[in-house]
Amino acid sequence: MIQRRTALGASLGLVILIAGLGALPRATTAQSSAVDLRNIVTGEKLDLSDVLPEGKDTPGVKQFLATGHNPYNTDASCLKKGEQTFLAACSGCHGHIGEGKIGPGLNDNYWTYPQNTTDAGLFSTVFGGANGQMGPHNESLTLDDILQVTAWVRHLYTGPVKDAEWLNDEQKKKYTPYKLGET
């Protein structure tokens, strides 16, 4: 009799467990991604399935999702668009050249979230938001816009080149810090 109750209890527990697992939220992505993009605060996987339809299938986005590296960091042709997006969406809190205002500075080698030293981390912060007043921009910017604005942020960097983890060794040799008014 005790074995029967134990088996019945175990079976009932298994059914409850399976039903409960089915009710948990599941993160999905619109595109397969080799990059593990997570919310910078909660650690939850970012859901790329509900993004603005334009700008999600560009070569730059595809390359980023495959490698985790922002191809626009070395593409000067996208900097003007990145700057315009930054001035419209970011400069109110982070300053016109990323010097910081009510939001942290973005042009030095101190990062509130150490993950932001990587392209995937910085993308995740802009896409999913962070603590304080940094809300997510996944509903106001396309994936391509986010890559271009983060390339602009990288361009604003004035800290020691050795700390620019997003640059490879060859890029570090050629890097010159941003100067106000440069075009």
Image (cartoon, grey):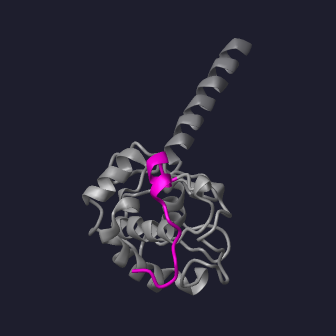
Quarter of the rendering containing residue 94: bottom right
Tell me, yes or no, whether the highlighted magenta stretch contains residue 177.
yes
- In the image, residue 60 lies at what x, y percent? 30, 58
Residue for point 58% across, 58% down: 161
- What x and y, as percent, mark residue 148? 38, 68
Work out whether residue 162 or residue 49 is closer to the camera in this orientation and state it: 162
Quarter of the rendering occupied by the N terminus? top right
Is residue 89 found left or right of 93 in the rendered image? left
Q: Position of residue 22 (x, y in %)?
A: 49, 43
Q: How many marks?
A: 0
Q: Is residue 172 above or below residue 16?
A: below
Q: Quarter of the image holding residue 53?
A: bottom left
**In the displayed structure, would residue 48 be above or below residue 108?**
above
Query: In this rendering, does residue 52 appear at all?
Result: no
Which residues, given as a range, are shown in magenta? 166-183
Which residue is at a point 47% across and 85% down the rendered structure image?
Answer: 181
Which residue appears at 33% of the width and 63% of the height?
A: 75
Report the front residue among 125 and 179. 179
Residue 141: give x, y in percent of width and height.
Answer: 39, 73
Quick check: 89 above or below 46? below
